[in-house]
Every structure is written in structure tokens, then in C-alpha cells.
Image (cartoon, rainbow, N blue to C red):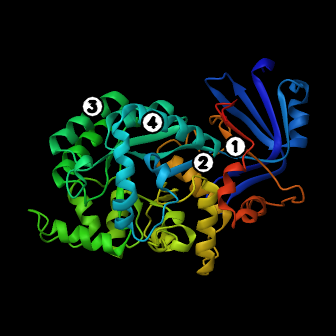
Amino acid sequence: MALQKLKFFIGTILNPQDDKKCDFYAHGLLVIEGTAKKARIKDLLPLEKGVKKYGSYMTIKNTHDLGHSLIMPGFYDMHFHWVQDDVREMPKDSLLGWLEKYTFPTEMKFKDKKYAQMRAEIFFKKLIKHGTLGGACYSSIHEHAVDAAMKRAKGHFVIGNVLMNMNSPEELTQSEEESLKLTKRLIQKHGKKHCFTPRFAITTTPEVMKEGSRMADRAKCFKQTHLSETPQEIDFVLSIYKKLPGFEKVKSYTEIYEKTGMLGERSLMGHGIHLSTKELGILSKSKTSVIHCPTSNAPLKEKGLGSGLFDFKKIEKSKVRWALGSDIGGGPFLSMFDVMRSFVDQHQKKGHKSATYVKALYRSTLAGAEILGQNKNSGNLNKGKEASFIVVPLPKNKFPIDAESALESIIQPLNKKREKYEGLLSDVYFNGQAVN
């Protein structure tokens, strides 16, 4: 065992495994081995056992006693728009109205390359402070905005430029040829980190979705878009597509994406609130994932868009994979702690007792890693995985007895002061190195 390559972290450790299981060490030891570029988790065990096993290797220099703090994996935010940071707390009335009034004018600013680079610098530093080290991200239509995001995102992200070819403001409308050439160029430039991203069926022509999907599939890139967020959106989509050749008999929003090649095991559908049993069957058969965004879908009084409540029980019964996302800027805050709180609170109010903090943590970490195919490398603190984790001080008077009470003790006190979730973290580590 190489003494100089080991680091030790002492604290209360949470290690999510699935919806119901989260390893809990009230006094735990996280052992890391490796270099700054490739640090791995060597061990995770109760402190008493850890001291017996590694005590002769623990020194003042390589041992970090984090005191009364939680150590847990970094978050995966599986649906967010980095270019909407400025509109996340703007007044909201309806999805389509909010896009027109606030979102589209804000995204137009990213035409300026220097502006895009400046905003990327600010946003991705902020994202790290919130402990988000992976996920799926929407950019603006502009190539340089995608490049700026790729350069500054730290962790396991797929990022794509929104594609807009119809029913869009003139300044944000591309021709089909421009969209496809840009897709090809971004795939060549960023490989599997590029995510093919039609904004949604309303703004992206079937031809672009079909050809772009083929390109993405050949390159084994992920694909993402929005699906069935509101009833008004669904009605509008169907009214458009029933007039298009080849779609006259289409009966659902999901069928449109099925016909355009948008579904598959590397496909991420944002929201998926208003889906029929038949649509869920299509999503399940194609292995498509749905990303639940509770803070964005929450009632207007909670700074959401009031889109409705995601039926996770129905989703799970249909065997559709799902994870959590913030949907910045439909969601008002970047913190996945806020997303977890919203998930638990909204579903518990409906009597869904299985909507626990442990479930929310799994769906904010390992579930996202599993969907992105990163679970062998990331998503929790299992041995052999990358040493990326966050540190969250516990309240002085709280001594949790399990993972559920630990999460509740840090999340619930701020449920009326949601903007303060940003300040919860004391440290963020990526590959064993502090990055915040």
C-alpha cells in the first residue's frame, strides 16, 4: 500500500444503492487512492474498523476529519438549461407564455460569443458550488455557447444545442440544413458528450429529428427533448403534426417522437407528466428514460410552472426508467436538495409514502449515472469508483440514526428559505480534489 497515494475522510457517510437502500455510517471512513487525475475510492467502512485497518497509514497530512458533516456522492441533474439561469425566478403563468415572454429573449443574448463565454464561466462555477457533477444539459441554438459549456462543465455531462426550425422567434430559427450541418459538426467536435437536442416537437421539424437522430445513433450520442409537460402543449403539438404529411393519423405526442426516431435507450424525455398507458408502453419498450422535474412542475405559488404532478408509481409500474432534474430555468433553484425536497413534499401531500428522501437521493445521483451509462464509474461511493463527493455540515443538534433522518435534518429546515440550499455545502471534491 503506497502511503503517499492514500487520503482519508472522516464523517457521516451516505451511499445510495437504490430507491430503498442507502448505506449509512454515523461515524465513517472514506479511503481514497490515486492521483489528482484519477483518484478512486479504495474503501468505505465504519470509522472504528477503518482505524484498525488503516491506522498505521493515517497522518495529519493525509487525514481530513470533516467533523459533524455528511459525505455523499455528487449530484446528477438530468434536465437543465444552463442558458436560462437569468429567468429561473421570473414570473410564471404558463409554459408557452413563459417561453415567449422571458426564455426566448434571454437565449437570444447568447448570439454574442463573449457574452456566452462570460455566462458559462459564472454558471458552471455556480453549478459546482451546488454539488452537481453530472447530468444532461440544454444550451441555446448557438455553436459557441455549446463549446463554452463543454469547456467549463466539470463532471459527467452531455450537452446539446436546442434545435429550432419552426414556430420560433426569427432570431432563434435555423434552417433544416443549418441544424443538421451544426449537429454533424458538434458530434465530430465533442463526440459522445454531444447530446442531440430538438427543443420539442413544436419547434423542430420532423426531418431534422429523423436525420439528426440517425446521426446521434450512429455516433452513440444521447438524445433529449421535452414530452407532455402540459395539456396545452400536447394539444398544440397534435394540432401541428396532424397537418404534416405522414403524421395525419398520429394519436399521441409520444408517437411523434417514435416516428421520428427520437426514442431509445440513450433518449431522455423531460417531464412526461401527462402520458397515457399506451405511451408509457412505447417508452418502456424502447428503453427511453423520463426525467422528472418537480420544482419546475410545482404550483405557481411555489415558483413552478404549475404543469402537474408526475405519477412516479405509474411510471415504475410501466417499467420506464426515470431520474430527477432541476429544469433550470423552469425550476427556480439550482440545488438538487431543493429538487429532492419538492419531490418528497409534493408526493407526500398526495399520500405517496414511498416518496422518501432516500428515494430522492438515489434518483438525484446513481439513477442519473445509470441512465447515462456512468454507473460503473460514478453515481455513488462504492469501491473502485471515482472519488467525487460533496460535504454537507449537519445541524449541531442533529444526530441522525439513518440515511432518511440525515437527509431530512439538512433539507427540511430550509423548506421556506429555498435560496439558502446553495450555502449547504462546505466542500465539493472531483477526483479526490477540492473544486469549490
Alpha carbon distance from label 1 to label 2? 9 Å
Where disc 4 sits, the SS reads: helix
Residue 435: numbered disc: none
Q: Can residue 265 be seen in the rendering of this structure?
A: no
Query: Dot 4 corresponds to which residue?
Result: 149
Task: Identify residue type, mark 3.
Answer: Arg
Q: Reading the chain from its start, which is encountered first: label 4 or label 2?
A: 2
433 relative position to 324: left or right: right
Where disc 2 sits, the SS reads: strand
168 relative position to 273: left or right: left
Q: Reading the chain from its start, which is encountered first: label 3 or label 1?
A: 3
431 relative position to 332: left or right: right
Mark 1 against mark 4, which lies toward the viewer? 4
Task: Identify residue type, mark 1.
Answer: Ile
Residue at 67% of width from left, 63% of height from top? 357
Alpha carbon distance from label 1 to label 4? 22 Å
Q: Are marks 1 and 2 in contact (CB under 8 Å)?
A: yes
**Quadrant in which residue 179 is drawn:** top left
Residue at 36% of width from left, 35% of height from top? 112
Q: Reading the chain from its start, which is encountered first: label 2 or label 3?
A: 2
**Quadrant in which residue 278 is drawn:** bottom left
Alpha carbon distance from label 3 to label 4? 16 Å
Nearer-the-camera pick, 114 or 214 = 114
Q: Are marks 3 and 1 in contact (CB under 8 Å)?
A: no
Q: Residue furthest bottom?
A: 351
- Residue 95 is situated, as x and y percent measured from the top left of the image, at 38, 66
Query: Dot 1 corresponds to which residue?
Result: 390
Within 10 Å of disc 4 (Cα), the crowding (few <14, some 14-19, many 20+) is many
Residue 75: numbered disc: 2
